[in-house]
Amino acid sequence: MRIENRTAKVTTPSDTQILMTREFNAPKHLVFKAWTTPELIKCWWSGGRGEVTVAEVDLRVGGTWRYVIASEHGEVGFNGEYLEIVPNERIVNTEIYEQAPEGTKPADNFVTFTETDGRGKIELLMECHSKEVRDAVLASGMEEGLQDSWDAMDRVAQSLK
């Protein structure tokens, strides 16, 4: 049974942090797989807001990632480096918006995968390097895009059962 619940919660624990949480209708190992597999990322990351033209994942400490969405508004890209990986449990990575002003420091993302009664959950804590960057991320429409994207990821993770 598919539930479209748009239940991602976005909070701001501090002046530099954004905490995003959501449960999924699939076990955490399938949520982790959807989160880290390039061909699956292409199915959910845009949330229907364009085509994911690049989903590169070198899932190892020191490896990099890069995602690009092409839409009628142009291309939007993000990239970063993996700092810590515990399969099916935790990923720590950097993230930078490729169109950010030069000199912008990347955010640090702390992604935790847990499970209760067969339902996976993601807690993504984004640590920005300033309140201004955090506020710019929040003002970008990030939350609406996140809802669409994580709804799509829920469908992808469920399809892997």
Image (spheres, rainbow, N blue to C red):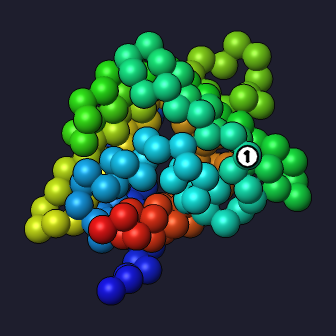
> Would you place residue 1 above or below residue 105 in this image?
below
Q: Residue furthest bottom?
A: 1
Front one among 17 and 145? 145
Q: How many marks?
A: 1
Residue at position x 82%, y 56% in the image: 71
Q: Is residue 89 left or right of residue 103?
A: left
Q: Which amino acid type is marked by label 1?
A: Thr
Can the viewer see residue 132?
Answer: no
Q: Is residue 140 visible?
A: yes
Residue 126 location in percent, x, y? Answer: 43, 36
Q: At 45% from the left edge and 65% from the top edge, which residue is drawn?
A: 156
Q: Using the image, determine if residue 111 lies above or below residue 156.
A: above
Where on the picture, by quarter, is residue 50?
bottom right
Q: Position of residue 87 (x, y in %)?
A: 26, 35
Q: Secondary structure at mark 1?
A: strand
Image spot of residue 39 (x, y percent): 55, 49
Give the quadrant of residue 1: bottom left
- Left or right of 101 on screen, residue 6: left
Please give the name of the residue rendered at 87% of the width and 48% of the height, measured from the top-left corner: 74
Measured as percent of width and height from the top left, residue 108 is found at 44, 26
Left or right of 56, for residue 36: left
Disc 1 target residue: 53
- Quarter of the image with the C terminus in it: bottom left
